Amino acid sequence: MRTDEELIILFQQGSRESFDELFERYRQRVYAFFRRRGCDTGRSEELAQETFLAIVRGVDRYEPRATFRRYLFGIAFRQLFAERRRNKAEGTAGLEFEPAVSPPNNADALWVRRAVAQLDSDHREVLLLREFEGLRYDEIAELVQVPLNTVRSRLFRARVELRAFLESEATVGRDQKGASRCSQPMQ
Amino acid sequence: MQPTHAVTPEEVMAYLDGELSLSQALRVRNHLEQCVACTEISGSIQRTSSQLASWKVEDAVVSLPDATLGISVPIRPDINSRRAPSAASRLRVLAAREWIWASAVLLLLGVVGIAVFQRREPDPLVDSFAGQEHAPGAAVRSEGEATSVAEGKRGSGRIGSEQTPVVSSYGPRIARTATLSIFVKDFVGARNSLDQIVAAHQGYLANLKITAPNPGARSLDAQVRVPSEQLPLVLAELKAIGKVEREEQGGEDVGAKSIDFEARIKNAREEEEKLQQILQTRTGRLSDVLEVEREESRVRGEIEQMEADQKALETRVVFAEISLAISQEYHASLNNPLSVGGQLRNAMIDGFRDAGGALLSVLVFLLNAGPSLLILIAALFWPARRCWRRLAAQNSRSLTQS
């Protein structure tokens, strides 16, 4: 099985099938990237499409010195920031936040989502990039443009705070099981 | 006794994430085996990660518009998009625009090409560049007036070609080379023209050598590097400097090599990661640890060497290399630059020099062979003298008897 970097190199040389395979590997993850950051389903699909389209257009700019994953999520990150700037410019009051659909009766997922929403935005971003996008510390540092040690400290604090939120949510949530509550939209 | 906390909680977290160097990872792992508090921190981080993994997102309905064929993906009708037009319709417009631009460019190229072709005489050497891709390894040679062109593979740059996507330029990764020999009358002018041509096309002289024998024709040998896409123009301008004596061109497809480098570097990196994991997850003797460290250093060295080779390969693709030779047409002079007196003086000096040289050669010979000759003479002198005396006595006896 070819690696992501091999596939993108082949795509640079004209192999459309290689890009199709990359797309199949990452479309769900890129979609989930936007969904976990507060975008609704429709907008997440559009942003994911635009991310892959940006890959196609700029394939000549890819250089093997970075992993494809880092390259892909770097583009997605820029798409997300552009989206947030547009929203701010338009004065749109927070994205309409829909809870990510999880298997039914999965209370843990609900507590996790709510706990993550309460984190500081900088800490949350580093946590999500590490836990779900699987980027290395140095890749995260390059993406969010902070020093490596800052990434490390933010990630640690995020995990500690999340742990604390989850433990408290587990106690409170059990008391209010089944109640629907509006969640804070993510920044 | 409570072990000293030489390890911070952040280091424990970095160890779990595989972000520590080998020596640091070993230190943390050894500490975790002794420290209950840090072990609890480790467990807490792992539980948090496990719980995070339960946060699933619904399956995506994302499909990619096929930009090469201009087909856009229908969006879900229930999407409550806040902006118009939607991404799918924007892609349709974008694809249509691309079709229009591409068609216009092709039409223009076709008109210009036909007009130019009808006006000028066909030049196989120039045509070998215009719109054609040379097959890997093919060479185009010309010697003086005789030219022969190796047919190359036509490039597949047409819109909608199944081989070549349209949204950006794809093609084989060709490292181009050329060899050119030119005769010029004005050597200095040719030298200046070379500098101007190279500068105008963002190239550089990798190597330059000029010889000027007296008497004799001046010559120049240079290695010129220019951006690959500029090669046809540069060659055309260089050939205009003088009379072409020899021309060769070549192209090497280094795409396979590049992919091979990628694969090898990737494999080496995976091997490096495995070596690090081995040391993180397994216990072993110090000698085993050192052995793995040595192996990791070796693999790291290989990775760096391959990355350097890959970089050099990329440079060969980006910059084409021209081996250029410019020779001045030599006109022998009937007049001797020296006067008669000068020639006589030179002859006299040469004569004395030769005589001195001959005398010196004799002296050198005598010094070299002299001792050996003396020994030989000494060894043969007494026997020779005895023989001589006997011969003389016999001669005198025979005279007396007669």
Image: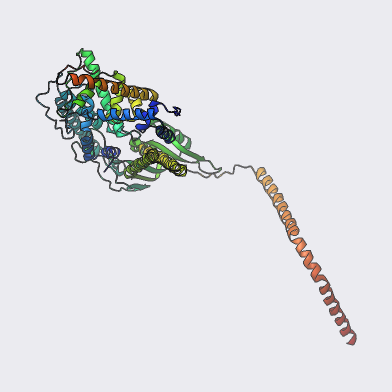
Image quarter of residue B23: top left
Q: How is the image coloured?
A: rainbow
Q: Position of residue A109 (x, y in %)?
A: 20, 26
Q: Give left or right: position of A63 versus B350.
A: left
Q: In the picture shown, does residue B325 fall above or below B167?
A: below
Furthest residue in direction top, as rendered: A91
Q: Position of residue B207 (x, y in %)?
A: 47, 38
Residue placed most toward the observer, B88 or B200: B88
Q: Position of residue A13 (x, y in %)?
A: 27, 39
Q: In the picture shown, does residue B332 fall above or below B102?
A: below
Q: Is residue A74 visible?
A: no
Residue placed most toward the observer, B222 or B168: B168
Furthest residue in direction right, as rendered: B400
Furthest residue in direction bottom, as rendered: B401
- The structure residue drawn at horizontal position 16% and vertical position 24%, both measured from the top left corner, is A41
Furthest residue in direction left, as rendered: B77
Residue placed most toward the observer, B140 or B103: B103
Image quarter of residue A61: top left
Image quarter of residue B96: top left
Q: How many marks?
A: 0
Residue placed most toward the observer, B339 or A81: A81
Q: Position of residue B88 (x, y in %)?
A: 15, 27
Q: Is residue B109 visible?
A: yes
Q: Give left or right: position of B181 versus B386.
A: left
Q: On the rendered image, what quadrant is the N terminus of chain B found in? A: top left
Q: On the rendered image, what quadrant is the C terminus of chain B found in? A: bottom right
